[in-house]
Amino acid sequence: METGVEATSRPEIPAIKEHSLLGSLESMRRDRLAFLLSVARQTGDIGSFRVGPAQMLLLNSSELVHAALVEHANDFDKGFIIHRAFRPVLGEGLFSSEGELHRRQRKIMAPSFQPRHIVNYAQTMVEYTERAQQDWQDGATLDMSREMMALTMSIVGNVLFQTDVLAETDELGAALSTALAYINYILSSFFPLPLNWPTERNRQTRGALELLNRRMQKMIEERRASGEQGDDFLSILLRARDEDGAPMSDQQIKDEALTLFVAGHETTAAALTWTWFLLAEHPDIYQRLRDEVDSVLQGRSPTYADLARLPYTLQVLKESMRLYPPSIALVRVALRPVDLGPYHLRRGQTIMIVPYTIQRRPDYFPDPERFNPDHFRPENEARLPRFAYLPFGAGPRICIGNHFALMEGHLLLAALVQHVTFSLLPGQQIIPDNDKTITIRPRYGLKMRVQRRHQVV
């Protein structure tokens, strides 16, 4: 128990001015990203706001992120709201599970996501990318979100299931979009209706989940029946054993596979979409990127071995994810009273860590609103506070596929830059938004014109 002296010596957590009953509910609904950025700029390292009666604490410093996600990782879980939103879609996969189940699954799966293993997927990534761009006619207009989703879905379908889902992109993509829209509905609604209520939204969501689970189960059964020992992730999940030699249940395999399927293409597609937008807006950076790729590759397809010689390409990708991180927020709920630095949190208090805001701190990233890949020159990146850049989270729950995603984005940029150049169609309003998905995407889409390049020799 705190003494009176200890309690009064703690700094007060600053709170924003808001409606006495609704708090900041309307501001969150109107423009979530702009609102959270405003809270961070008003309050500094930590700030309090309410969504209806529910208090939220926004953490916006690398020190507090370290305290919450690393030092006190076991003192938090994702909380009821996150579980209510994600578990109907992802079950008890790595994103949604907690405690001993999460630790067990993470330990089983982590070796398969190490760089020495995922290098085997580099060729597949490049082959699918070069196949996709061949269909883009010179001068055609593309919906970049759609194109990047189709591309990354085809890649993840192969490396996860060793099957070509490109022909099923529309059906699978629609089902995934519906499922992800349901997640966002739960996260953004004050009184969301239970999934078993007979509403049109719930009917569509249940149909999408049935399709996704049916596909997963069919793949599991076909793989078991074939007896093949492939190196795709489904084969790895089927072969996986815990310390006691026990395999995963079919339901656990489906949960993990669906989690990887969603995370393995949705976030990378969003990151690439914003990268093309930023490059089109900054022709000098675009040209520097092309020069590096042309000089290194000389017209041939990129390989994993080439990535070390394409540092600026990686800087471009990292800077894009700084300005438009794929995931909007990390949410945690205190399981017990806990101290984060000088601040005391009660059991049940909810914290949010928003990469979109922390990665715009001017003391971490000079001129933070400017697209500047030199932020990630090795000497500049080395000076960053450790948790100032969080595109994949941090601590024991850091995204297990972070190396996979970086390799994929790096290779796809290099492969596409060789063949095509994208330019923005005029008259568009490009606003970051996540009303319909859990990732940050352009609110009104992103239309770009493709121009084929002469092959470099």
Image (spheres, grey):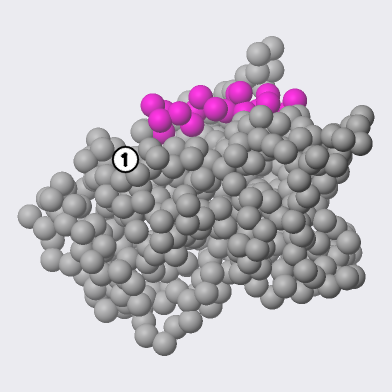
Q: Nearer the viewer, residue 345 or 417?
A: 345
Q: What residue is drawn where x is 90% and y is 70%?
A: 21
In the displayed structure, 358 sits above or below 2; it is below
Q: Is residue 430 visible?
A: yes
User: Which amino acid lies under the numbered mark 1 shown in the image of this protein?
Assistant: Glu
Q: How many marks?
A: 1
Q: Furthest residue to the bottom?
A: 427
Residue 4 occupies quadrant: top right
Binning the other alpha carbons within 10 Å of mark 1 as few (below 14), some (14 to 19) or many (20 upward) gives few
Q: Furthest residue to the left?
A: 457
Q: Which corner quadrant holds the N terminus? A: top right
Q: Is residue 156 visible?
A: no
Q: Position of residue 456 (x, y in %)?
A: 11, 58
Q: Furthest residue to the top?
A: 244
Q: Which corner quadrant holds the C terminus? A: bottom left
Query: Does residue 268 belong to the magenta stretch?
Result: no
Horizontal arrangement in the rendering, residue 151 relative to residue 400 (left or right): left
Q: Position of residue 287 (x, y in %)?
A: 21, 63
Label the magenta part by its dominant secondary structure: helix
Q: Position of residue 376 (x, y in %)?
A: 35, 47
In the displayed structure, 105 sits above or below 139; it is above
Q: What residue is drawn where x is 70% and y is 62%?
A: 184
Q: What residue is drawn where x is 27% and y is 79%?
A: 139
Of helix, strand and loop, which one carries label 1?
A: helix
Q: Nearer the viewer, residue 340 or 214?
A: 340
Horizontal arrangement in the rendering, residue 63 relative to residue 374 (left or right): right
Q: What residue is drawn where x is 55% and y is 57%?
A: 356
Q: Nearer the viewer, residue 134 or 268?
A: 268
The magenta segment: 100-118
Q: Position of residue 385 (x, y in %)?
A: 48, 40
Horizontal arrangement in the rendering, residue 299 relative to residue 154 (left or right): left
The residue wearing badge 1 is 379
